[in-house]
Amino acid sequence: MRNYIAWIAAEFDAMNRETSRVDWAAFFVKKAVERGASLDDLSRDLDAQAKRLGESTLVLEGSSKQLESWEELLANFRRELEKAVADAPGSDDDRKVLTSRIQEGFQPERIKKAVSSLGAPDYARILREAIDAAREQRAR
């Protein structure tokens, strides 16, 4: 049960990180266009641009502010689960055990061992989606 909860936490964390990368990619595209690049230019040079995005994203992900933000999201998620258990029907003992398993599953070392299904970030895909979104926005 603890490992399953840790996997859920790892999935939640991975989705938050992916959301941040998507947001950063949209900002990356916006800034590149503001500096004079066209969306076609970005698309033609996708591999090099994706590498630049990946490098800048690694810096952003390593910032203490960003790490704290993701840790806070995980803590909030854990508290929501604990609250749901507290409000659920069942015996006090059952709720205590499940709350304990949630707390154990959300331990950072356990989450690090859990493997998210998202895998490593694909910056080319993320950037391509950001470019496509910018094209759609321009077409409106």
Image (cartoon, helix red, strand yellow):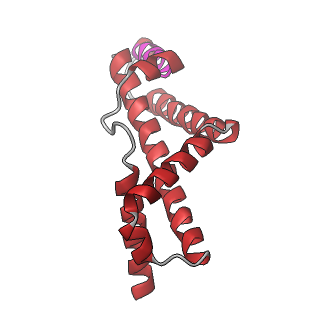
Residue 94 shown left or right of residue 61 in the figure: left
> In the displayed image of the protein, which residue is found farthest to the bottom?
140
Instruction: Decide which of 51, 59 is in the foreground and name it.
Output: 51
Question: Residue 45: where, in percent of width, then height?
Answer: 40, 65
Q: Position of residue 126 (x, y in %)?
A: 39, 56
Residue found farthest to the right: 65
- Residue, x 55% and y 63% (percent of image)? 28
Q: Is residue 129 left or right of residue 103?
A: left
Quarter holding the N terminus is top left
Extreme-left residue of the structure: 117
95 magenta-colored = yes
Which residue shows up at 35% across the image and 32% down it?
A: 116
Q: Main secondary structure of the magenta part?
A: helix
Nearest to the observer: residue 13 or residue 118: 118
Quadrant for the C terminus, please.
Answer: bottom left
Q: Would you identify the image quadrant in which residue 135 lies?
A: bottom left
Specify whether 54 is left or right of 135. right
What percent of the width, then of the height, locates residue 138?
A: 44, 84
Residue 94, quarter of the rendered image: top left
Question: In this view of the protein, can residue 50 be seen by the observer?
Answer: yes
Please report the bounds of the magenta region as a residue range: 94-106
Tell me, yes or no, whether the highlighted magenta stretch contains residue 84. no
